[in-house]
Amino acid sequence: MHIFTFQDMTLVLDTSSGSLLEVDELAGKIISLLPQHTVEAIRETLASGYGQTELDEALAEVFKLVEEGNLNGGLPSEPVLEIEVPQVKALCLHVAHDCNLRCKYCFAGTGDFGGGRTLMDEATGKAAIDFLLRSSGTRKHLEVDFFGGEPLLNFDLVKSLTAYGEEQASKFSKIIRFTLTTNGTLLGEDETRYLNDKKMALVLSLDGRPDVNDRMRPFDGNVGSYTPVKEALLRFVQARSGQNYYIRGTFTAHNLDFSEDVKHMYELGFREISVEPVVGGAGETYTLTTDHLDTLRAEYDKLASFYLERQQAGEPFNFFHFNMATYDGPCFGKRVSGCGAGFDYVAVTPDGEIYPCHQFVGNPRFIMGDVFTGIRDNTLSHEFRQANLYKKPECMACWAKFFCSGGCHANALHTSGTLLKPDQLSCELQKKRVECALGITAAKLRSGR
Amino acid sequence: MSKHVKTLIQGNIKATAMTTACKECQTSCQSACKTSCTVGNQVCQNSK
Ligand code: SF4
Ligand code: SF4
């Protein structure tokens, strides 16, 4: 159980059922005593501060929830997740290890992942699609994200692989959902028309205010990208009637006040926004550290207030991490197995090598096989699959576990050298985001929206 | 009528604890972030 405040509400998340409660002061006290105390002990502890009738009433309400299994129950046992052969259902397809921007924090080494600038050829791309269809077993809904570097540097391949994927998927009675992650600089008329005709979901990169964006996302020669990118993205989003996209920004130690960047993007007219903490780069001036935590937490609160304010004003926007699917969220198995890197989801390089996910590309220890011959041995896959929530002591002790699902394997490995110990800074930010998302849900329910 | 505790959301974790994940829903890192893992905002494909 986790008791926290959001604006003027005191909320309780019951970890093992996923139920969310709003409590008054007395019930909050009772609930915080629940884990270590009997009813009698709780009554005794609180008797001096509250009248007997009130105390009885509150105790009865709390214990009714306990009996119904919605409070302070045991955790469900670890689900059986292991299967012999991984069934890959999602590909991150690196169609271009090349980029026309020189973003300072790029985990891909400004596009080439440390391996030279290359484009995927058609034979490799088709082999990747074939690999996906062959490896997906009984799964019907498959995903391909065109990624890079900058995937629009290889736009012809994006088009031919989409056509090939659609054709092949229908032969196997499967559906491939295509998405594309782009820096927006190459979204011309042809690209826009094609991507909109195909209803492809897009992730578009922009970091927010002009100086914030340009400091980290310049073209070669340190020329800022804000103006051309902003214009291209606005045109693009308008052409698809504001549907099916996310503007995705990164915040760093240079813009700890990232809620201002979200506001800026809102004011530009974008309504689907996601911003993420920068990854890695230990020792760089932009790196986030635990010293920044208080500021960042306060920033998420500001963002949550802005989110609710816009909603109440009738001009809402989506913020990716605040969209908690509280009623129709994923099943337990998914909550425990997490991102699926290395078994549900893999990344494919321009040469056709397979890695557990895009964040591992370029590190030879993590090559799992290639799209021509398939996954060579299942050791890595097994290692990633078994690193589920129930195997991580920090996660098992954490109230946010069934919303977070155990954090990013890549972050864990980078900071603690093992998949089984999550990155602490990421955890603190994750927990704050979950609190805000639950708080927003509660506030919306209260105002009937 | 509860005076002290209001259940805002009845969680589905226990109800789905016995089911096997069909994995037809979207992969978390394919959605918008590409750097962090949040499953809480993934919608179950079977509830659509
Ligand atoms: S926030 Fe951290 S400790 Fe908690 S579940 Fe996520 S990765 Fe595990
Ligand atoms: S390891 Fe991290 S970056 Fe890779 S798929 Fe999982 S959450 Fe995403």
Image: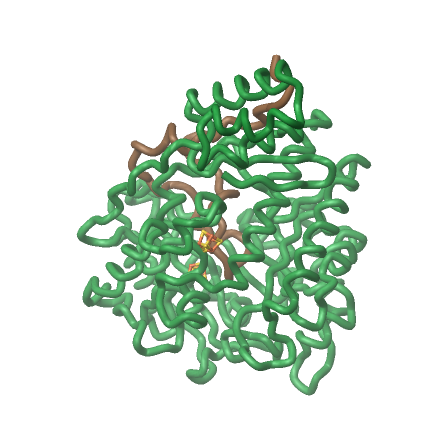
Chain colours: A green, B brown
Residue A378 falls left or right of residue A297: left
Viewer-nearest residue: B9 or A185 = B9
Q: Residue at x 42, y 36 (%)?
A: A16
> Can see residue B37?
yes
Quarter of the view holding residue A144 = bottom left
Q: Residue at x 47, y 49 (%)?
A: A404
Residue A401 in percent (x, y) is at 45, 47
Numbered circles on residues, count: 0
Quarter of the view holding residue A360 = bottom left
> Can see residue A123?
no
Residue A51 in percent (x, y) is at 66, 19
Viewer-nearest residue: A409 or A49 = A49
The quadrant of the picture occupied by the C terminus of chain A is top right
Viewer-nearest residue: A158 or A254 = A254
Viewer-nearest residue: A102 or B11 = B11
Residue A211 falls left or right of residue A90: right
Q: Residue at x 27, y 61 (%)?
A: A383
**Image height of A123 relative to A85, above or below:** below
**Image height of A216 relative to A340, above or below:** below
Residue A21 falls left or right of residue A176: right
Residue A53 falls left or right of residue A83: right
Residue A26 in percent (x, y) is at 63, 28
Q: Residue at x 75, y 63 (%)?
A: A231
Residue A1 in percent (x, y) is at 49, 38
